[in-house]
Image (spheres, helix red, strand yellow):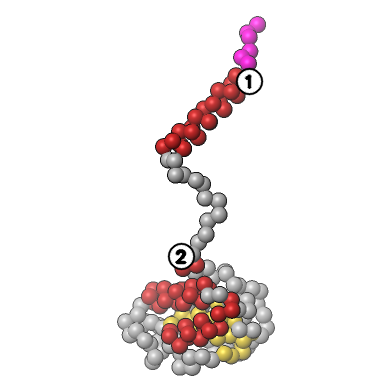
Amino acid sequence: MAKRKNPGVTGLVIGAIVVGIVVGIIIVNPGYSPSMNVEVDAKDMAYNHAEGAVAPVNRAKVSHILISYKTAKSPVPGLKDKNRTEEQARKLAEEIWAKYREAKEADRDEVWKKLQAQYNEDKVPHSEYTITPEVNPVPEVREVGLTTAVGAARITMPPGKSGYHVVRRVE
């Protein structure tokens, strides 16, 4: 009858190998420490259309910032950059969204007004208006406005005929 090896010795050898690997990593890279709590700056976050989304409501008060581009179906007369491409318009809309998103809750109203004054290309720059499933001439704004949480902002995806709208739900 063949003699079985002691299973305790095998476990001891495997444990020694693992310890040797860990010690080797520490010796080669002494400054290494695994990061458990990674903090991401809001400016580094890509736009997420699902963030701030809620189930559709029947009534919402919204405000928006329109960013148009030269090849939009109906570019606005107030287009601030006559050579802006659709890609550039989307990037600008995402930058506006990020600036609003990173603002402190208490400062968001003021930040939104400043963003509107600086970027909005709509003829009525500071308007707030009520929308319902039946009321709003821009279908993309209606869809986003009725599915955005109060206080959140989202971007119309795809853009409307005049460009991208950064829509903020007020109530």
2 w.r.t. 32: above or below: above
Mark 1 secondary-structure assignment: helix
Query: What is the spatial separation of the Cα atoms under label 2 and label 1, in whole angstroms?
Result: 51 Å
Residue 5 image-quadrant placement: top right
Q: Position of residue 35 (x, y in %)?
A: 52, 50
Tell whether 10 sits left or right of 43: right
Viewer-proximal residue, 106 or 101?
106
Q: Is residue 6 magenta?
A: yes
| Residue carrying label 1 | 8
Please name the residue shown 44% across and 41% down the image: 30
Q: Residue furthest left?
A: 83
Taking the image as drawn, is residue 164 in sight? yes
Quarter of the image where the C terminus is located: bottom right
Image height of 3 relative to 48, above or below: above
Q: Mark 1 is on which residue type? A: Gly
Please name the residue that numbered disc 2 is placed on. Answer: 44
Secondary structure at badge 2 equals helix
**Which corner quadrant holds the N terminus?**
top right
Identified at 50% across, 61% down, the residue is 40
Find residue 158 and report its horizontal and vertical position in percent.
48, 75
Q: Quadrant of residue 81?
A: bottom left
Near mark 1 (Cα within 10 A), the count class, few <14, some 14-19 or many ≥20, is few
Placement of 122 over or under 93, stated as above or below: below
Which badge, 2 or 1, is on the more N-terminal residue? 1
Residue 108 part of the magenta-drawn span: no
Question: What span is colored magenta in the figure?
Answer: 1-7
Q: Residues within 10 Å of mark 2 (few under 14, many from 20)?
A: few
